[in-house]
Amino acid sequence: MSQTDPRYTIKGASEAQQQAVDFLASQFLLTDERLGSITKEFRRRMEEGLAADGRVLKMIPSYITQRPTGTETGSYFAIDLGGTNLRVLQVTLDGKGGVSTEHQKFVLTEDAKSRSLFDFTAQCVETFLDDHNIRPIGHQPPIHMGLTFSYPVQQTSLSSGTLVQWTKGLNVPGCVGRDVVRLLQDALLRLGLRVKVVALVNDTVGTLLSAAYSDPTAQMGVILGTGTNAAYYEDEANVAKWKSEGGEIVLNMEWGAFDSDDFSVLPFTQHDIKLDRKSINPRKQAYEKMISGMYLGEIARNVMLWLADQRLLLDGRSSEVLNAMWSIDTAYLSAATVDDSPDLSEIQQIIEKTLNVPESTLVDRQIFKIISILVGERSARLSAVGIVATLTKRPELLNKPINVGIDGSMYEHYPEFERIMAETVSHFIPPEQFKNVKFSLAKDGSGVGAAIAAMLAAKEL
């Protein structure tokens, strides 16, 4: 590999070091042929999920069957409930595809995470309405709100969904198997708030709706950040498990789970297997673990230890920090990828100060940079697989402009990620169709999207 790509040739390396890096490059750099076969399997799994529940790709109907036009106006409200924060937003639509937002952010307390989540959420809504002097009183109509709920829910209507399980460190008893909108609505009633939760959306569905308001050609919403997932507009006739009405419906793909059942097609290395085995959710979210920001640093750490154990990196030394799981943040890999200083001083800081390894050679730093490039490039190219499989699912839409709204730190900040991903997509879609595809940053889709869902729900009331 190093003979053809100068990026992987290490000045001053021993033969054994160069061979080890060449081997890593052969594992992490995926050919188009390999990506093509993964895409084919991805598509097969999509079809399975469209036909029946309980498949690896869940393909969950969101009950959203309209597209925003971008001409709607008015103020709508949203609650965005994530893993560590909760936000209450007022989103004003300007009728020209633009939005302005006012929001307040609240940090989830330990009590909220383990006991009082819905009462805590209702109190945050009350604080926001009172601080902005917009609490409905007397005969004023109730405020309609959308709720972005970033936990697994089996949606039962646009405004109801049963909690499947808690994730991301939350564990509030008595909620699994119950309707989360009902639980929140009851908490709002206990405070005497005239607020009606009219739409429940997943954060990926929110990203799609946010992109679609600013550009009605939006067909997909993708999150490429700490985690990864996607939503898209599907022809109802293609969703066998859905009572078709001849229009379109937004599906939440839950694509991070791809290939988690049998580990048969994704390019697993020993470093991925080790990460999966030691994670809190083994044999789950296999695709997400190769792509998203939460995991890339840990894959790189596993590679470093594998090399150090062979005395091919850091002269076999490690440190307490480097030996600890999750000690390498994906942000360190971002920084390493773009360190072009003669002595790779940024990488030296990361290894010697942050990871606390006593000293590093220039060869060690070059190897760290190569690991960062390989892990990031594989992530970007694998991200393209899901995008290609989804866009080509409805090939007729590729004959006119089509927008893919993307949110998340990997897409926005990881060096070269956007370019590599888009270039890879272009290898699998004919040029006359690829020229119609536009990737755009859909920032804060999860908050704005829930307000747009509330607007769409109001149209139907």
Image (spheres, rainbow, N blue to C red):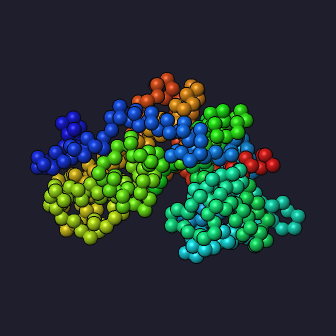
In the image, is residue 142 above or below residue 394? below
Q: Residue at x 24, y 59 (%)?
A: 305
> Is residue 359 rendered to the left or right of residue 33?
left
Q: Is residue 119 above or below residue 208?
A: below
Residue 307 x %, y %: 20, 55
Front residue of this view, candidates 154 and 18: 154
Q: Nearer the viewer, residue 42 or 336?
A: 42
Q: Estimate the x, y position of residue 442 in percent, counting from the top left.
A: 55, 47
Asked if 104 appears above or below 216 in the picture, the reply is below
**Does residue 208 appear in the picture of this structure?**
no
Place of residue 2 in the rendered image (x, y in percent of width and height, measured from the top left)? 20, 40
How many marks on residues? Answer: 0
Residue 378 visible from this viewpoint? yes
Q: Residue furthest bottom?
A: 111
Residue farthest top in this picture: 432
Relative horizontal placement of residue 221, taking residue 362 as reference (left or right): right
Q: Residue at x 19, y 59 (%)?
A: 308
x 53%, y 48%: residue: 254
Left or right: 247 in relation to 341: right
Residue found 81% across the figure and 49% down from its top: 461
Point out the image quarter for the N terminus.
top left
Residue 296's x, y, as percent?
A: 37, 54
| Residue nearest the viewer, comparing 347 with 202 | 202
